[in-house]
Amino acid sequence: QKEVEQNSGPLSVPEGAIASLNCTYSDRGSQSFFWYRQYSGKSPELIMFIYSNGDKEDGRFTAQLNKASQYVSLLIRDSQPSDSATYLCAVLNTGGFKTIFGAGTRLFVKA
Amino acid sequence: GAVVSQHPSRVICKSGTSVKIECRSLDFQATTMFWYRQFPKQSLMLMATSNEGSKATYEQGVEKDKFLINHASLTLSTLTVTSAHPEDSSFYICSAITSGRAAYEQYFGPGTRLTVT
């Protein structure tokens, strides 16, 4: 079992729709969770991080965390073509000093 | 915001040669730097963690004699791929954090695309 699992996609949504990206993790002791966006050929950029169960909103982005289910998701509202990228879910390991990345979900937003 | 640079951005080398990649924190002191490798359509895989002035800690399966890491100052870490082979072709990304910060506050460099022919 991979430590951080994501559906590789591609996930295709029309412009203006909600894109929903999901991630599960195996380390039950993990406390910090992140979503990064990575454009082709570029390094990742942090979109959001979340520590507590529930929802966290930042602009068009909402991160959701359910530690009991070891599940974290990212919702992108009013999706734009510029949101087309690979979204990486990342988890800080129990020791708190190593970030484990999922393989990423490719998102395409059609204009 | 904090800026991390990498040099070179792209490098092509012949099999058997060595390549050095530099990672610099431009406006903060990076007490810890991480080196990642990313193959096409795959995840970022942590290769090693380097702390200024001490030996790097390598992840399981990463050959420390092949991937030499030197974190000689608070603003510079280097990764040298020795005797490179085509299977070492990958996207190498560094990140840096400053003292007292958790790993999530890591700032990524722009990456270096290595192609070994």
Image: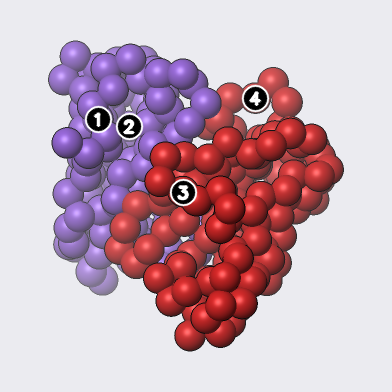
Chain colours: A purple, B red
Disc 2 marks a residue whose amino acid type is Ala
Q: On residue B101, which mark appears?
A: 4
Q: Are marks 4 and 2 in contact (CB under 8 Å)?
A: no
A99 sits left or right of B22 in the view: left
Q: Are marks 2 and 3 in contact (CB under 8 Å)?
A: no
10 Å crowding of disc 4: few (<14), some (14-19), many (20+)? few
Q: CA distance from mark 3 to mark 1?
A: 23 Å
Q: On residue A63, which mark appears?
A: 2
Which quarter of the rendering shows the C terminus of chain A?
A: bottom left
Whether marks 2 and 3 lie on the same chain: no
Residue drawn 74% across the image and 34% down it = B54
Q: CA distance from mark 2 to mark 3?
A: 33 Å
| Front of the two marks 4 and 3 | 3
Q: On residue A25, which mark appears?
A: 1
Whether marks 3 and 1 lie on the same chain: no
Q: CA distance from mark 4 to mark 2?
A: 22 Å
In which quadrant of the rendered view does residue A109 lie? bottom left
Disc 4 marks a residue whose amino acid type is Arg
| Front of the two marks 2 and 3 | 3
B116 sits left or right of B56 in the view: left
